[in-house]
Every structure is written in C-alpha cells, then in structure tokens.
Image (cartoon, rainbow, N blue to C red):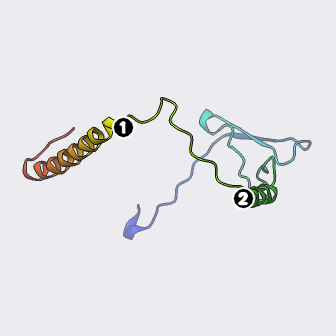
Amino acid sequence: LGRKGTYAPLSVKLRVHFSFNPKMKNSLVVKGMCPQNADLERYYSKKEKKPFPVPIVELRRAARERIKRQKSLPRKPIPPPKNGLLVRNLIPVAYEVLNARTTLLNNLRKLIKIVPVHAC
C-alpha cells in the first residue's frame, strides 16, 4: 500500500508464448516460464456449457407421466425386512434402550455445562 491507502503501481514482466489453432474453435494455448500457469481452463458461458444427454424438458415430461401413472395404481405394501419379521418380545426392550439413550444424552449435556471439557 502506498500513501493514504492507495495502491502503488506494480509492473511484472513475464515471457509468455501464445498459440492459436484456427481449426479448433476457441482454443488458446498459453505457455510460459511458470508451469502452474501453462494451460488455463477455458471459461464456458451458460450457452456454451455441455448439454445434458437427455434434455431437461424431456426428463420433466417423463417424470410428470410417471407420477400420473402411479396415481391411478394402488400403492404397493411395504415389504417385510430382509432379515426376518420383527421379534415381538424385543419391542419393549427397544423402547427401554431408546429412553435410556435419551436420558444419557440429556444428562451429558447438563454435565458438560457444569464441568469444563477441553478437546483438541
């Protein structure tokens, strides 16, 4: 920074070689002494970006048709779990475990507020 918050002029001299191939549309190769600046990717505008393999309009149309077809059909029942049906006598145990976990987490929150915990 120069005086009173102004930027001082800066001049840099680089030896750079540009080459342009007229056969390739919008191709520009930059070669310089610094390898990290050798080939910069070309900036594409929204119009020039690679299109989808299937146009968005067709994807939307197909989705709308699929939703209309599914509305007329009855809903499929949810299949049972692949590891077998639920064990009825373990359902109360699962509720006990869930309640114990909730109690543990709530008490841990209270404890962390009282006791300082240092982590790295």
Q: Looking at the rendering, which quadrant does residue 100 occupy?
A: top left
Identify the residue under disc 1.
88
Dot 1: element: helix
**Number of the label disc, if any, that sits on residue 109:** none
Q: Residue furthest bottom?
A: 4
Q: Earlier in the sequence, mark 1 or mark 2?
A: 2
Identify the residue under disc 2.
67
Q: Residue furthest right?
A: 23
Up the image or down, 92 lies above or below 9; here it is above
Q: Amino acid at mark 1?
A: Arg
Instruction: State the residue in front, 37 or 1.
Output: 37
Specify few, some or many for label 2: CA neighbours under 10 Å numbering under 14, 14-19, or 20 or more: few
Q: Looking at the rendering, which quadrant does residue 30 occupy?
A: top right
- Quadrant containing the C terminus is top left
Give how far across and how far down residue 50 sits, in percent. Answer: 78, 49
Instruction: State the residue in front, 114 or 38.
Output: 114
Front disc: 1 or 2 = 1
- Say which residue appears at 68% left-offset and 55% top-offset: 74
